[in-house]
Image (tube, grey):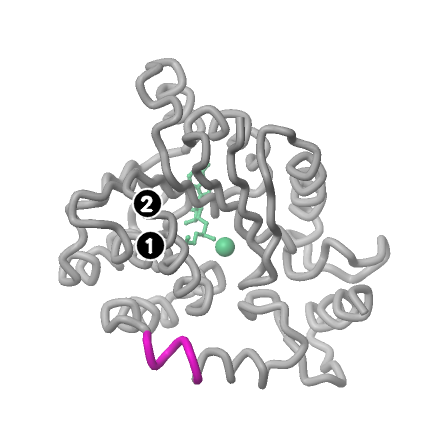
Amino acid sequence: MATKVAGQQCEASNGAQNQAGGHQEVGHKSLLQSDALFQYILETSVYPREPEPMKELRELTAKHPWNIMTTSADEGQFLNMLLKLINAKNTMEIGVYTGYSLLATALALPQDGKILAMDINRENYELGRPIIEKAGVAHKIDFREGPALPVLDQMIQDGKYHGSFDFIFVDADKDNYLNYHKRLIELVKVGGLIGYDNTLWNGSVVAPPDAPLRKYVRYYRDFVLELNKALAADPRIEICMLPVGDGITLCRRVS
Ligand code: SAM
Ligand code: CA
């Protein structure tokens, strides 16, 4: 079954139709086998409950040429609920783009909640910022423009950030996820969560070696595979890989 899905998606990456009416392109924000089922989830449970600012940001982002990168609405809803369930207050996000997951996070946190948000590209964040401001949650966000790794290194060196984050969402350069993990495991508190996004990488994690994958999907796939193996073998965390969006692996620090 899994191989079939991957096969369909690889074909889909080449523009071919698949019989199940499944996803045609990388960027369909679900690994479900039918678009109809995904639409059902969105229309039945996500869109009717989506906060107005998130809808506005989603619609604005849809017009942006790189909209393939945005977090899907169902994943945004999931993150929002997860953060409330764990009573998150101090959080971090690596990879902001126009800010859809950031807004889902900011809306879930208490008034004095904090998000350290990092992205090498400020321009895209600035597109979404007026909506985040209008939503009254911009004061929770500390946006840093630039690569995340040096910021993490600085925080590790400082010492005072160790074990201080309730939740960290990683949604940036997949070839650095293991480098992030080495540092984030120190920065997240024991009992806190790290969420690594896109860990099913458009289903390509089970694609056969000769599958016709898009270049960037093929390139990052090996890093995603390596990350998934490393997380499964890491005794410092409990893990749960969820097929929401493009796959998100939740890691709960236990030691
Ligand atoms: N979470 C976002 C959302 O909900 O729309 C999507 C993030 S997008 C998939 C990945 C982002 O990671 C891009 O905006 C990119 O600029 C950023 N990025 C890439 N390399 C980075 C790095 N080394 N440090 C920080 N951000 C990086
Ligand atoms: Ca993502």
Q: Is residue 152 magenta?
A: no
Amino acid beneath label 2? Ala
Number of callouts in the render? 2
Q: In whole angstroms, how far apart are the C-alphas of marks 2 and 1?
A: 6 Å
Residue 66, how many percent across, how many down?
44, 61
Label 2 SS: loop
**Nearer the observer, 127 or 176:** 176
Residue at numbered disc 1: 84
Quadrant showing the N terminus: bottom right
For image coordinates 44% across by 84% down, the residue present is 44
The disc at residue 88 is 2
Would you say residue 168 is visible in this rendering?
A: yes
Label 1 SS: helix
**Nearer the observer, 254 or 16:** 254
Q: Is residue 8 above or below residue 171?
A: below
The disc at residue 3 is none
**Quadrant of the rendered image containing residue 47:** bottom left
Residue 243, how many percent across, how many down?
60, 61
2 and 1 marks in contact (CB < 8 Å): yes
Point out the stretch of residues depicted in magenta: 44-49
Residue 216, how many percent across, how many down?
64, 52
For image coordinates 43% across by 37% down, the residue present is 192
Amino acid beneath label 1? Lys
For image coordinates 32% across by 47% down, the residue present is 87
